[in-house]
Amino acid sequence: MTSQHLIITAAALFMTSLHVAAVEPDCKAVQTPNQQRDIDTIKRIELGWLTSEFHGNVDFLDCLLTPGYAAISTKDNLIRSKADLLGNVAPNKGKTTQIPPLETTVVVNGDQATAYSVMKGHKKTGEPYESRFVDSYVFKDGAWHAVGGVDL
C-alpha cells in the first residue's frame, strides 16, 4: 500500500470514528417539560427556542425540529433547513445574552399548532428592532416538534 493510500485510509477511519462518536442528544432531558396539547406549552416552547438560539443550545433545537424542518425567510426569499439553523446557533454556545421580550399568539388544533411570535429588542447601536415569525408544530410521541416556519 502506498503512503497516499495509507493517508486516505487513515482519514476515512478518523471520519468514521467521528461519526460513531457523535452522540444524539437526550431529548427527554433537554425538551420543554410537562408538554400538553395546549397554548401554554407552545408559548413555553417558543421562549425555549428563542433562548436556545441566543445561548447556543443546539441539543434543544435538534430535538425540537423535525428532520425535514425548513423555514422561509421573506426578507431574502431563502429557505433555511434544520442544518442551517443549527449551524447558525452553534457559535452562541455558552453566551448569556439577555433574551428579548417575546409576544406569542397560538392556535392549537388537536395534534397541530401554529404560533405567531413578535420579538422586540435593540441592536448594538441601541436602535430598536422587531422580528416576526410563524412556527408550525405537530404533537408526536408525547412532545411537540416544529415542522416548518416563516420569518416575516
Image: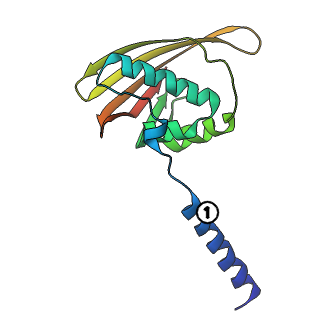
| Label tally | 1
The residue shown at (46%, 16%) is 117
Can residue 60 be seen by looking at this rendering? yes
Q: Quadrant of residue 148?
A: top left
Measuring from the top left, give residue 72's x and y in whole percent: 46, 30
Q: Which quarter of the image is occupied by the N terminus?
A: bottom right
Amino acid bearing label 1: Leu
In screen coordinates, is 97 left or right of 68? right
Q: Is residue 123 above or below residue 55?
A: above
Residue closest to the eye, 5 or 46: 46
Measuring from the top left, give residue 3's x and y in whole percent: 76, 86
In screen coordinates, is 18 left or right of 30? right
The residue shown at (30%, 40%) is 141
Measuring from the top left, give residue 125's x and y in whole percent: 77, 12
The residue shown at (35%, 28%) is 35
Callout 1: 10 Å neighbours few (<14), some, many (20+)? few
Residue closest to the eye, 87 or 92: 92
Judged from this view, the residue extending furthest toward the bottom is: 1
Measuring from the top left, give residue 31's x and y in whole percent: 45, 34
Judged from this view, the residue extending furthest toward the left is: 110
Q: Is residue 23 above or below residue 128?
A: below
In screen coordinates, is 63 left or right of 101? left
In screen coordinates, is 51 left or right of 63? right
Please name the colour scheme applied to the rendered image.
Answer: rainbow
Can residue 81 be seen by looking at this rendering? no
Q: Quadrant of residue 34?
A: top left
As helix, strand or loop, the secondary structure at mark 1 comes to: helix
Name the residue that disc number 1 marks. 18
The residue shown at (71%, 8%) is 127
Q: Quadrant of residue 56?
A: top right
